Image (cartoon, rainbow, N blue to C red):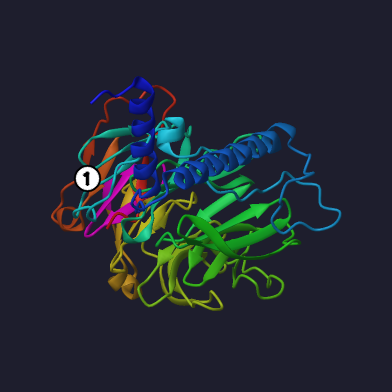
Amino acid sequence: MAVTQDDLERALRETFSRRVAVTPPLAVDPAGLAIGRARRVRHRRTLAGLCVAAVATAGITAGMGQLGGQPGRHTTPTVVLGDPRGSATATGWPVAPELRAPAAEGQVELIVGGALVTAEGQRYDLGIGPVERAQRLPDLGGWLLVGAPTPAGRTLWAVPSGETPQVLLAGAEAVVLSPDGRQVAWRDGNGLYAAGVVANRLVATAGMAAAHGATPVRFVGDRLLVRSRDGGHLLWRPGTGTLPEGDRHVLDVYGVLPDGRPVGRVSAGGEPGKSCLAVLDPVSLAPATTGCGAVLAGDGRGAVSGDGRWLLVNGRTGGTDGALLVDLAALASGGAARAAGPTISGDVAWSGGAAAYVNQGGALVRVRPDRVLAGERASTTTLSGVTAGERPIVVAGTS
């Protein structure tokens, strides 16, 4: 039978139209996904533009959200944003490694020049610039990084496991992190603030706009240790009234015992220039147990082990400056210290029964209390790939 070209084209069109009419529903809507993804990328790019504009203009706060903003305040804005960079697929920013298990005892992670160096020695460039403090997030969630000070202030980054860095806070004058990575506190101008960290966001922000020059030092449980303008220390529960008077007898606080009592350095009454090690009351900061057997440095460098048995701290023994290991269980009998290694130049990270820190020469130092008690010195490892001017930072909370 003869079939013309017009008849063939008409039949073909009818076949296609029937197929389109009965197309089975898709599990997802690709158009909706594409539109949603484009909107998110556009939103993140808009946030990034706002963040850059805030830093560039420094004092111009029009159109920007400012935490704790009060009438008459003229300070560098503290801005809490989501991810200003977008996803890795959209912008090509570096991606952090994916955490699958807690670090083994004694393993150390480092931040070197804005790059994360894992315990296995793998280096991941995060593209965030110099860092002065690093802390693991709980539940293998990633890392919190505090940027080095700049004319625009400090930046707090969240680096989720397997994702790109995100800005949580910008323009702060001082930032401290809780040992478990669940809280953060900062100073903005004359204001003092604290917030929780949940799903890489700051939540439940509380604080006061008139903190009179007080600076956050560290978290002590659910309270914040604060250094007042006159040099005294006090404990403040965020969101509860004004700051109490500071205790000028407390000079430094190194950490907290498992029962919540802080361990710090206090002035020795009646002896100018001399100080003692003390376990403090968790509410009043009054010394509960004191030992004056160790000669402690005045730089505040040191940390308490997770089990509360040991304190690694800078001091002097035998006429030589360096890191000292103090048995806190023997504090009541004087708290004698043993030479443990070279001088601590940054934070100390305890992982299980071992401590790690970076010395003044930029080398990684590992201290094991059992070996120190046996008369051995700490092991020192020179780090390769560290350029002049870079100071490695140990990551806390890896245990």
Side of 46 where 253 appears, left or right: left
Side of 371 where 293 appears, left or right: right
Residue 351: within the magenta?
yes
Evaluate whether residue 17 shows in this view.
yes
Q: Say which amino acid is labelled 1.
A: Ala
Identify the residue at the far left of this view.
Answer: 374
Give the class, few, some or many, for how many residues have Cα within 10 Å of label 1's Cα (few <14, many ≥20): many
Instruction: Give the camera-side residue of 12 and 148.
Output: 12
Evaluate whether residue 361 shows in this view.
no
| Residue occupied by mark 1 | 378
Instruction: Give the camera-side residue of 282 and 188.
Output: 188
**Image quarter hosting the C terminus:** bottom left
Instruction: Give the camera-side residue of 348 and 51.
Output: 51
| Residue 375 in the image, given as x and y percentages of width and height | 15, 51
| Residue 93 in the image, given as x and y percentages of width and height | 43, 32
- Could you say which quadrant of the image residue 258 lies in? bottom left
Which stretch appears magenta?
Answer: 339-358
Side of 272 where 312 appears, left or right: left
Q: At x 36% / y 60%, what residue is drawn?
A: 138
Q: At x 72% / y 72%, what residue is drawn?
A: 242
